Image: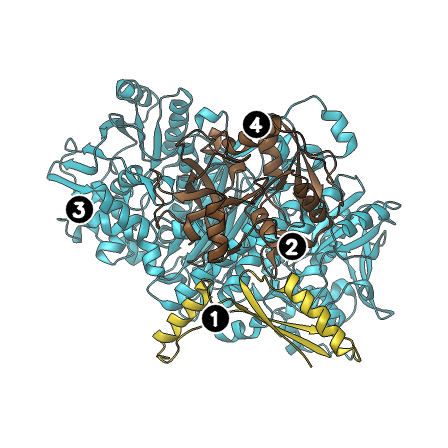
Amino acid sequence: MKAKIIITPKKAVLDPQGKTVQTALAHMGYTDVTGVHIGKYIEIDLAPGTDKAAAHKALNDAAFKLLSNPVIEDYKLEIE
Amino acid sequence: MNFAVLQFPASNCDQDAVHAVRLLGHSARLVWHKDASLGDTDCVIVPGGFSYGDYLRCGAIARFSPVMQAVKQFADNGGLVLGICNGFQVLTEAGLLPGALIRNRDLQFHCENIFLKTATIDSPFTNKIPAGKILRVPIAHGEGCYFADEATLAKLKANNQILWQYCDQDGNLTDSANPNGALQNIAGICNDQRNVAGLMPHPERACETLLGSDDGKWIFESIFAALKNKPVAQAA
Amino acid sequence: MTEPAITPELVAKHNLTPEEYAHAVAILGRTPSYTELGIFSVMWSEHCSYKNTKPLLKTFPTKSPKILVGAGEENAGIIDIGDGIAIAFKIESHNHPSAVEPFQGATTGVGGIVRDIFTMGARPVCAVNSLRFGELSDPTVRRLFSGVVSGIAHYGNCFGIPTVAGEVYFDKTYQGNPLVNAFCLGVLRHEQITRGAAKGVGNPVFYVGPATGRDGLAGAAFASQDLTEESAEQQRGAVQVGDPFMEKLVCEACLELLATGAVAGMQDMGAAGLTCSTCEMAARASTGIEIELDKVPQRAPNMSSYEIMLSESQERMLIVVHKGREEEVKRIFDKWDLPWSEIGIITDTGHMKVRHGGKLVVDIPAKKIADESPVYQREAVEPAYLKAVRAFRLDGIADTTSPADNLKKLLAWPSIASKNWVYRQYDHQVRDGSVVLPGSDAAVIRIKADSLPVMTAELAAQVAGKPVPDKLIAMTVDCNGGYVYLDPYEGAKSAVAEACRNLACSGALPLGATDNLNMPSPLKPELFWQIKESVRGLAEGCKAFNAPVTGGNCSLYNQSPAGPIDPTPTISVVGLIDKPEHVTTQWFKDAGDAIILLGDAVDTTDPILGLGGSAYLQVIHGQKNGSPPRCDLEVAKTLHTTLIGLIHSGLVKSAHDCSEGGLAVALAESCISQLIARDTPRLIGATIDLSALKDVRLDALLFGETQSRIVISCKAVEAVKVVERAKLMGVPAVQIGKVGGDTLTVKTASGEFSAPLTELHDAWWNSIARAMA
């Protein structure tokens, strides 16, 4: 089993990495790009047969407390 | 006075903080991150460095160290806590200070001297800074851009919690004097109880004229004065 | 897993010649196993054995009463600096890995040299680096440059070591083969010197640090061959990844462990990993060593003994512990959450034995493989191009008519321009010791009592009550590769002279040196001649300045399909400053001060000689040609000791040496290089009068690079005294102007030019940032 967590910067937060990549893409001719936001992707391996609901609750907690910083970041959690 | 300087794995300004406090005539010792107690302590310094390699986010992992629980309790009891650079990041991650420190706007690490304007002397960390004195202190960080949402920022201003701002030689808060893109040129703040503060610049690197500036000592002298005038907080 | 059969092809693939292979067979008395073949291959690579350069390296001066650990003995040399304190320092290259993956190549370069220093028992206190790239107009070069700088910054900043000095040159000779030389200096007490020797039969051997993976397989062998597209591609998967966080923990844990007194010997696993560390430790102690690979922590599944022995995974150490004190190792490494494993034992067999899966896979006489590496006396033939260089007529070049414009162009030339874009990314102030920051002639650091490693209880009792006075150490790294290309012997001498001149300008006298020979292939007689002549120049220079070589590094085969690099023997010299008040910086201090030139303004035989190999000739006339300036070591030495004497008398307010760009650039830099803080330079002008020098070409006077010249400033009332005293010592000296104003104004016999400091500063300060934007 795997949990996948995608962390993105909050919209209001300055994202200089995203801006830099956006500019680079524009230079390369990708003119339709209107925004780039760079975040993190975390993959967590879970033991087979782990209770999905319980894992969801625990990882939600971990994502809020450690894996993301709610002041500047949002996250999305998926378990498959 | 007894200072406790926290030592996380890959703290690297811990010895500098101890050196500065001792140089200024007080005692300081290192407290290991796995210790659950601070011992006999008047003030805690969370030093600079790359705690836990700054993996995940700067300061994110350090806040879960056993010692941080003790620091929280110490702060709740009114004890003085100063976070420098990575220490500032740890304190924001731990929720002891509002806001967050994000990547410098030009994406580069900056090691250089900057000028600091003291926004208020009404704090245990600024009370001895001479009126109008512009401090020249080094910075050394890649993620020091202070960010907070508008409500938080408004609260910081209303409560006079902004302690230091980046400025030019003459004290003007210009954009070019801002090394990292921090909102409102914020270099350091305190909590609403005014006993916990954090700043990105390194006052402990500016306590000797041999090293180019001794302006940083005013911040330490402020702490010494505050401790002298105040009943000592109970350590956890 | 079945191991491949040993065939002549396989031997050749391991870069062993048939003769070398025959010698290996003779040492073993049988055909080597596959793993043993790998071991011979790396142990006898140039990187580990110096087989092509050993006879040359023997000519270096390596003795002085202050040397505690000399060249070639250990991972780094150690020099006494008084009061029971010593410094350990060394420079090492990471050229080929940086060409392939600049960020990781540079990080592991820094990591490796820092490890070499704490392996000696010293606390690393500062880093320096010397970099060479192609021209910044090329996007690939910008990517390499930016990657290397970020890599050094990442590793050094996270580890917490200030990067206090360095040099960066840009020249198309380095286009396909950049140079990355990293230097580290550490401090310790004499009693704390730790040897990399496998002492004490029966003592256990510990592996500490992160698990072994397949990274950097046989990196030492990779570093010892030509850099081609194919070899780079092959190695891309092999480049090691550096983890400064891990290294910081390993360093702290090792220093803490040394303070217990439980360690009998220690060595880092650098080039050739477990192979080199086990062989060398046993060879140094004339003992044997037996290890079990099943006990080595492994990151990848199913690693073969060949892979485990040759892996260059970073941040690992091999520690021999006094029997019975194993628990102390375990306690300390557990405290730092670091992996450790007891993997073997010291024996009296003289053999290095390795077991894997219950089988003996390696059985080699350790001393023989370490000490009986092949040695070659290569053929040296003077290259043909030098005839053309010597025949080049400088007087065929027309004299300048626009000196102010030339000066701005030179200041903006990336090799001369301010390197603030680079050093601002390096933490250069951590550890509370940086006295003179990057941007002056040499860095100066302060060593204080708490810079030293923690002591054992016995040592602490022994030195109790004896305070450690602060020490001031100055250091620099220099080499003008263009000079060396045009005349390897003179160029190498000039590199040493410039390094020592930079120290003198900072108030320091040399203690010792460490060299990094960045050279092309030794197999071509013309190229080997360059190596030989460079070493001759370095050796003479180091002798003249009493700067014995305490160690260093040879990086050969620096050539890409485009051709060999200019021979670049970088030299780092370390010196001592007696008192804080003797620390001197290069920028002018106060308006009204007198400006004095020490040394002959131009070459006394013919002024035009200063233009040979000069930056001016390259930038303004597009030619790297002509014999470089001659370097008279006696003249240089007198100049340096005279300057130090003047500094000790408190007469000198600033001192800056003339190097690339000559007198005009030195004067401009003295006006514009002081930095108060971010975006806040302190500009202070100068009015110079050189009109007394008649019948001298303007370009030679302003931009010639005649050696042994220093621009100093002093109080106006003391100018006469300074000039008289210098002359008394046999150093030509003349007041050439005074400090003040907001321009650099220079009057010569043929006219006058003036440039606003703001313009000069902008050209010099922002040039690299603009190229990188």
Letter of the chain shown brown in the rendering: B
Q: Residues within 10 Å of mark 3 (few under 14, many from 20)?
A: many
User: Label 2 belongs to which residue?
Assistant: B52
**Image check: B27 left or right of A31?**
right
Q: Nearer the viewer, mark 2 or mark 3?
A: 2
Q: Report the residue at 38% width, 62% height from top.
A: C134
Q: Position of residue C445 (x, y in %)?
A: 51, 36
* Front residue (pair B199, C17): B199
**Image check: C175 left or right of C240?**
left
* Front residue (pair C136, A11): A11
The hue of chain A in the figure is: yellow
Q: Examine the rendering and report whether any part of residue B145 can be seen.
A: no
Q: Could you give the CA–CA distance between mark 4 and mark 1, rounded to whole angstroms? A: 46 Å
Q: Nearer the viewer, mark 4 or mark 3?
A: 4
The hue of chain C in the figure is: cyan
Q: Nearer the viewer, mark 2 or mark 1?
A: 1
User: Label 4 belongs to which residue?
Assistant: B225
Amino acid type indicated by mark 4: Ala
Q: Residues within 10 Å of mark 4 (few under 14, many from 20)?
A: some
Q: Secondary structure at mark 2?
A: helix
**Image check: C187 left or right of C566?**
right
Give the number of callouts: 4
Q: Nearer the viewer, mark 4 or mark 2?
A: 4
Say which mark, if any, is on residue C167. none
Judge if badges 1 and 3 mark residues of a common chain.
no
Mark 1 belongs to which subunit? A
User: Label 3 belongs to which residue?
Assistant: C403
Mark 4 belongs to which subunit? B
Q: Could you give the CA–CA distance between mark 4 and mark 2, rounded to whole angstroms? A: 33 Å
User: Label 1 belongs to which residue?
Assistant: A37
Q: Examine the rendering and report whether any part of residue A10 can be seen.
A: yes
